[in-house]
Amino acid sequence: MSGGRVFWVTGLAGAGKTTLGGALYRRLLDAGCRAILLDGDRLREVFGGQHGYSVEERRYLAMCYARLCSMLADQGADVVCATVSMFASVRQWNREHIPGYREIYVVAPVDHLLERRAFYSDPAISQDVVGLNPAYELPTDPHLLIENDGRRTPEQIAEEILSSLGDHRPRQSEEEQSS
């Protein structure tokens, strides 16, 4: 069994990571890939929901997500993980430990972020918001930068991701899958 790929979809809250991750996941399934979709918010629940939003707790969870993605990819699954991923050290760990790692950084215009996430303008909580908190380390060398300005559908962007990263895999026959 060959190793799977990890599509690490990262960006600020409201940039469209979950929506784009879902479209990419569906595109992989349509292509006959064994795909798994992981979303950072849902993963918090899976890991018991007891972790807060401090820098240390975020770093701990990010490494849990990275190790989970690595384990699933080792088993041959293509994993789409939509997560804020605020730490350069976690993204570097992914590059060094996951052979099929592809980092996709999703950016959106500020007005789009404000429209989708009211907390960006709330001074009472803005210090805890990733992107407004200085602990957030923006990706500096993603495999792909996606500008999500609303002009393209999530499905079009998913196709762009696969085309740009050279990741079209032909659908396997049942014989190939069982060998």
Image (cartoon, rainbow, N blue to C red):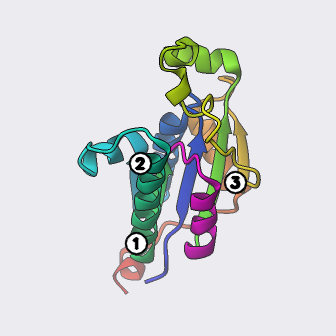
In the picture, the disc for residue 71 is 1
Residue 95 in picture, x, y percent from top left? 63, 68
Foreground tag (3 vs 2): 2
Task: Find out whether residue 136 is within the magenta segment.
Answer: no
Instruction: Give, as a three-letter code, the residue at label 1.
Output: Met
Residue 133 in picture, x, y percent from top left? 60, 32
Please tell me which of labels 1 and 3 falls first in the chain: 1
Marks 1 and 3: CB-CB under 8 Å? Answer: no
Instruction: Give, as a three-letter code, the residue at label 2.
Output: Glu
Residue 152 in picture, x, y percent from top left? 66, 29
Distance from disc 1 to disc 3, alpha carbons, whole Å, reads: 25 Å
Residue placed under numbered mark 3 in the picture: 163
Residue closest to the eye, 162 or 31: 162
Residue placed under numbered mark 2 in the picture: 57
Going by the picture, which residue comes out furthest to the right?
141
Residue numbers of the magenta segment: 83-99
- Residue at 23 percent of width and 48 percent of height: 48
Q: Is residue 142 visible?
A: yes
Q: Residues within 10 Å of mark 1 (few under 14, many from 20)?
A: some
